[in-house]
Image (cartoon, rainbow, N blue to C red):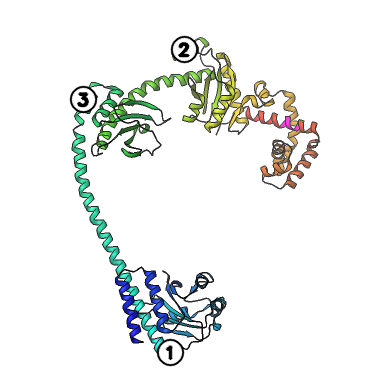
C-alpha cells in the first residue's frame, strides 16, 4: 500500500510540475484515490469563493447523470438548512474530520434517490485540510457495502492532505505567473512609452516646421481653397471638407485616393479612421464653439508620424476661412428669414416684398405652399427641396416651398420624421397671412405627425371660415351638459365621446384608448344619451355628435397654443 501511495504521490507531483491544468490534475487525484481506497468512484469537491457551497470540480468513475444531480438537485451547503439536506461531504468540511456513511440509505432529501440511481452504497468523505485551510473535500463512493479499513482511510487522508498542499502550491504558481505577466506587461509599456516619446518629438519638430507656411498663407489671404490645397500638398494627400449638418462636400483639394465619408464621433483632435486600403484622418472643426465641418485627409501609404500635428495646425486656419465664408451666407440667410416672416405676418407693402424677394433670387409669383414645422433639420431641408424660404414666427417655424407637388411633399416630410402641417398653396403675397393663420390653427387641432390640410375635410372649411353662430350653439347644446357633468363630477364623458367617434363607433377600441373596461365605455355612452337626448346607435344622432365635437375642437384651436 505504501508503494502504491508513493507511486500516486509521484504521479501527481510530476503532473503539477508539468503545469497540467487544474481540472486534469484533480481528475488524476480522483483516479488514484479509487485505487488506494478500493472505492468504485471518487469526486473532488471545492468550496466556492464565499466558502459556503461545495461544487464538483473533478471526478473519476461517476456517471454524468449523477454529476448533474450533484450540481442541480440542491446546493451542497456546508451549513444546510436542515438535517434532511446534510451530506457526508458537507459534514467532513464543517467538522474537519473524515466521515464514513456505511449505508447511503441514511441520506436525506433528494440525495437518497440520487445515490440509489447511481448504485452508491457506502460513502467516504475526507476534508482537504492543511493547517488552517480546508478548501474542499475528497469523496469516495462504493457500490457495495464496503468497510473501509484503517489503512485505506489513512491513505485517503494522506491523499487529501497531499491534494490540499498541491492546490495551495498551484495557487502560488498562479500568483507567480500573474506577477510575471504583469511585470512583462509593465516592461512592454515602458518600452512603448519611451518609443512614443521619441515618436512625438519627431512629430512635433516636423509639424512646427509647417508653422511658417501657415503664417504665409494667412498673410496672403489664400482663401479656403488655397488653405486646403496647401494642406494636401504638405501631406501628399486628398483633403475633403464635409458639412456636419447634411454630410455634403463643401470643398476638396489635393492628390490622393477617393475618400469614403463615413459616420464618426466628433472628437477634439484628429483621429485615425479605418477605410479599405486608405490611410484616413478626420477632425471636427468648430466656429464659435459649434461644430460646422469635418476635415478629412486621406493618402495611400506612408507613416502617420507627421500627419496628425499638421492637420491640427492647419485646422484653425481652415475654420477661419469657413467662418469668413459662412458670414456672407448668414447675411443672406437672415434676409431670407426676415422675408419669410414678413410675408406670413403681412408686414410691408407687396411691391417691397416682391423687390426684396427678387434681390435674394426668389420669385413670389410662383406658387408657394405654406408649411409649419416643429423644427428644421437636415432631413426636413432635404424633404423641402431647394429655394425654400424659412423663418420663425411666434415660436413656430414657417417654410414657404415653391413649385411643390403636394403628395410628394407630404411623403417626403413623413419620411423626414419631424412634425409638420402642409397648408394652402398661394400665388399672391396677400394670401400668405391667411394661409399661415389657418396652418397654425390646424397645428393646434391635431397631434398627428404630418398633417395635410386638404385631408382634414370639414374641419378645413371651419378653419377657413370660422365657426358660425349656429354651429357654436349646436356644440353648446350637445356638449354643454356633458362638459358641466365632467366639471362637477370629475367624469370623462366628453373624452369618451371623442374616443368612441375616433374609434369608428367601436366600444372595445375606445376602451383601449381610454385604458378602461368596455363596460365603462358603454355606461358612459348611456349617460351621454340621457344628458343629450341623442342615441349613439342612430346614424343621425352620431352625425350631430361628431359635428359638435369637431366644432369644439376648432374653437379650441382658433387661439393656437405653442406647438410642442
* 505 on left or right of 321: right
Query: In the image, is residue 546 part of the stretch drawn in magenta?
Result: yes
* Res 149 label: 1
**Residue marked by disc 2:** 358
Q: Is residue 99 above or below residue 14?
A: below
Residue found at x 80% / y 31%: 540
What is the secondary structure assignment of the residue under circle 2?
Answer: helix
> Cβ–Cβ below 8 Å for labels 3 and 1?
no
* Residue 227 percent across, percent down from the top left: 27, 26
Would you call the spot at circle 2 few (<14 residues within 10 Å), some (14-19), or many (20 or more)?
A: few
Q: Nearer the viewer, residue 342 or 252?
A: 252
Would you call the spot at circle 3 few (<14 residues within 10 Å), some (14-19), or many (20 or more)?
A: few
* Residue 328 percent across, percent down from the top left: 37, 20
The N terminus sits in image quarter: bottom left
Q: Does the rendering let one see residue 559?
A: no
* Residue 143 percent across, percent down from the top left: 51, 82
Which range is magenta?
Answer: 544-548
Mark 3 and mark 2: Cα distance apart in space? 41 Å
Mark 3 and mark 1: Cα distance apart in space? 99 Å
The image quadrant of residue 137 is bottom left
Q: Does the rendering let one see residue 308?
A: yes
Instruction: Give the overall secondary structure of the magenta segment.
Output: helix
Amino acid at each position: 500500500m505504501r508503494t502504491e501511495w508513493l507511486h500516486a504521490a509521484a504521479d501527481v507531483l510530476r503532473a503539477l510540475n508539468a503545469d497540467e491544468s487544474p481540472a486534469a490534475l484533480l481528475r488524476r487525484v480522483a483516479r488514484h484515490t479509487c485505487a488506494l481506497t478500493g472505492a468504485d468512484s471518487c469526486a473532488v469537491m471545492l468550496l466556492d469563493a464565499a466558502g459556503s457551497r461545495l461544487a464538483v470540480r473533478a471526478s473519476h468513475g461517476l456517471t454524468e447523470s449523477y454529476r448533474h444531480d450533484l450540481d442541480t438537485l440542491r446546493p451542497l451547503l456546508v451549513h444546510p438548512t436542515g438535517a434532511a439536506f446534510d451530506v457526508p461531504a458537507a459534514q467532513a468540511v464543517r467538522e474537519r474530520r473524515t466521515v464514513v456513511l456505511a449505508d447511503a440509505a441514511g441520506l436525506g432529501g433528494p440525495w437518497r434517490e440520487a445515490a440509489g440511481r447511481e448504485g452508491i452504497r457506502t460513502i467516504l468523505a475526507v476534508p482537504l485540510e492543511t493547517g488552517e485551510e480546508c478548501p474542499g473535500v475528497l469523496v469516495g463512493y462504493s457500490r457495495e457495502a464496503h468497510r473501509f479499513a484503517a489503512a485505506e482511510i489513512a491513505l485517503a487522508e494522506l491523499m487529501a492532505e497531499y491534494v490540499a498542499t498541491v492546490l495551495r502550491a498551484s495557487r502560488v504558481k498562479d500568483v507567480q505567473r500573474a506577477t510575471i505577466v504583469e511585470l512583462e506587461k509593465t516592461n512592454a509599456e515602458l518600452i512603448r512609452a519611451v518609443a512614443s516619446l521619441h515618436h512625438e518629438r519627431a512629430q512635433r519638430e516636423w509639424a512646427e516646421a509647417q508653422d511658417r507656411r501657415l503664417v504665409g498663407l494667412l498673410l496672403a489671404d489664400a482663401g479656403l481653397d488655397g488653405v486646403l490645397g496647401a494642406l494636401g500638398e504638405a501631406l501628399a494627400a486628398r483633403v475633403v471638407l464635409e458639412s456636419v449638418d447634411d454630410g455634403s462636400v463643401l470643398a476638396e483639394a489635393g492628390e490622393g485616393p477617393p475618400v469614403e465619408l463615413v459616420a464618426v464621433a466628433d472628437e477634439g483632435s484628429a483621429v485615425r479612421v479605418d477605410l479599405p486600403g486608405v490611410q484616413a484622418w478626420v477632425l471636427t472643426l468648430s466656429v464659435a464653439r459649434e461644430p460646422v465641418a469635418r476635415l478629412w485627409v486621406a493618402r495611400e501609404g506612408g507613416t502617420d508620424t507627421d500627419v496628425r500635428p499638421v492637420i491640427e495646425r492647419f485646422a484653425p486656419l481652415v475654420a477661419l476661412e469657413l467662418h469668413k465664408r459662412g458670414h456672407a451666407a448668414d447675411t443672406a440667410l437672415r434676409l431670407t428669414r426676415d422675408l419669410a416672416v414678413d410675408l406670413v405676418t403681412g408686414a410691408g407693402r407687396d411691391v417691397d416684398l416682391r423687390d426684396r424677394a427678387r434681390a435674394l433670387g426668389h420669385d413670389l409669383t410662383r406658387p408657394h405652399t405654406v408649411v409649419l414645422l416643429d423644427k428644421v433639420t437636415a432631413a426636413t431641408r432635404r424633404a423641402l427641396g431647394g429655394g425654400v424660404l424659412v423663418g420663425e414666427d411666434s415660436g413656430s417655424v414657417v417654410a414657404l416651398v415653391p413649385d411643390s407637388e403636394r403628395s410628394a411633399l407630404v411623403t417626403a416630410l413623413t419620411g423626414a420624421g419631424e412634425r409638420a402641417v402642409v397648408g394652402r398653396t398661394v400665388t399672391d403675397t396677400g394670401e400668405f397671412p391667411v394661409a399661415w393663420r389657418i396652418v397654425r390653427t390646424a397645428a393646434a387641432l391635431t397631434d398627428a405627425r404630418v398633417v395635410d390640410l386638404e385631408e382634414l375635410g370639414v374641419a378645413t372649411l371651419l378653419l377657413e371660415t370660422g365657426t358660425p353662430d349656429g354651429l357654436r350653439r349646436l356644440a353648446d347644446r350637445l356638449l354643454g351638459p356633458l362638459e358641466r357633468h365632467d366639471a362637477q363630477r370629475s367624469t370623462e364623458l366628453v373624452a369618451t365621446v371623442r374616443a368612441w367617434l375616433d374609434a369608428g363607433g367601436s366600444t372595445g377600441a375606445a376602451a383601449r384608448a381610454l385604458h378602461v373596461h368596455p363596460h365603462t365605455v358603454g355606461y358612459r355612452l348611456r349617460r351621454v344619451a340621457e344628458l343629450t337626448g341623442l342615441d349613439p346607435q342612430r346614424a343621425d344622432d352620431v352625425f350631430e355628435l361628431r359635428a359638435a365635437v369637431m366644432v369644439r375642437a376648432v374653437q379650441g384651436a382658433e387661439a393656437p397654443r405653442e406647438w410642442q
